[in-house]
Image (cartoon, rainbow, N blue to C red):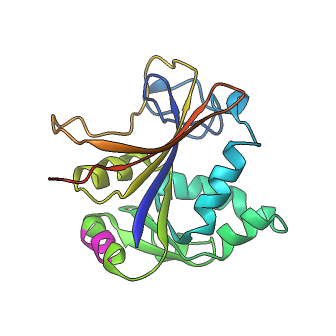
């Protein structure tokens, strides 16, 4: 399986709480919901639908999973929501237990086993394993060389601080731009893959 990450990202690299004011206030972050004014359904909608069409399972960190689990089961009847609700889901957490897994088809990956278990999933046959949000988990997987594709929706806003996506470890990682589209709202929808090593 390919591990595919999609993120709404500010121009200064912040990915924290794009969806709503209470989504993630860690560090006093006060700009939750910042991505909404820039969503262009005509361009970004098809990009997300294409990603969903290739997806065979979803992977989340705890906070993103809890946000999604509180929202998507109530959206039955929408094709995107129906597919999301029916897909197998994996959540990495050190604090959740099996009794907390109220969103159908969810399997817990204990935090201490995350990298090993995700390596195993990636080695199985199948479509994409899609990660939305989950920046802490994504940082770890980028650091481990386990991300096969990044779908970044880079939005024309500066947030001045907040959680960023990429490891701050001094390592050089070269990416290849596979596709790029600009929306009417000024969002660059870019797909990147790790560059082939010589």
**Percent coordinates x, y for residue 128 in the rendering:** 48, 69
Residue occupying image coordinates x 46% and y 16%? 160
Q: Residue furthest right?
A: 77
Query: So how many labels did they put on this image?
Result: 0
Q: Position of residue 68 (x, y in %)?
A: 62, 56
User: Secondary structure of the magenta portion, mostly?
Assistant: helix
Please give left or right for residue 95 compared with residue 9 in the image. left
Q: Does 97 appear above or below 26? A: below
Q: Residue furthest bottom?
A: 125
Say which quadrant the N terminus sits in. Answer: bottom left
Q: Residue at x 70, y 26 (%)?
A: 185
Q: In this view, does 173 lie above or below 158?
A: below
Residue occupying image coordinates x 36% and y 82%: 124
Residue 74 position by quadrant:
bottom right
* Residue at horizontal 40 percent and vertical 83 percent from the top: 125
The answer to whether residue 25 is left or right of residue 110 is right
Is 80 situated left or right of 88 in this image?
A: right
* Name of the residue lying farthest toward the front: 198
Q: Where is residue 24 in the image (x, y as percent from the top left)?
A: 53, 38
User: Is-magenta flag for residue 119?
Assistant: yes
Q: Which of 166 and 101 is in front in this view?
A: 166
Q: Write down the quadrant of residue 85 in the picture.
A: bottom right
Q: Is residue 178 magenta?
A: no
Residue 31, image x and y in percent? 59, 24
Magenta-colored span: 116-120
Could you say which is closer to the camera, residue 141 or residue 113? 141
Give whichever of 197, 17 is nearer the camera.
197
């Amino acid at each position: 399986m390919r591990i595919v990450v999609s993120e709404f990202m500010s121009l200064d690299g912040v990915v924290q709480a794009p969806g709503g004011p209470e989504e993630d206030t860690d560090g006093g972050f006060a700009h939750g919901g910042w991505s909404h004014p820039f969503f262009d359904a005509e361009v970004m909608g098809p990009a997300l639908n294409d990603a969903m069409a290739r997806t065979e399972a979803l992977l989340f960190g705890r906070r993103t999973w809890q946000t999604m689990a509180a929202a998507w089961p109530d959206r039955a009847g929408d094709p995107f929501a129906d597919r999301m609700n029916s897909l197998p889901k994996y959540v990495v957490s050190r604090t959740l237990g099996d009794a907390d897994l109220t969103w159908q088809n969810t399997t817990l990956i204990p935090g201490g086993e995350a990298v090993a278990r995700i390596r195993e999933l990636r080695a199985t046959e199948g479509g994409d394993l899609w990660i939305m949000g989950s920046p802490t988990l994504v940082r770890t997987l980028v650091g481990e060389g386990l991300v096969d594709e990044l779908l970044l929706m880079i939005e024309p806003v500066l947030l001045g601080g907040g959680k960023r996506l990429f490891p701050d470890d001094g390592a050089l990682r070269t990416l290849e731009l596979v596709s790029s589209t600009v929306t009417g709202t000024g969002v660059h929808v870019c797909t990147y893959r790790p560059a082939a090593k010589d």
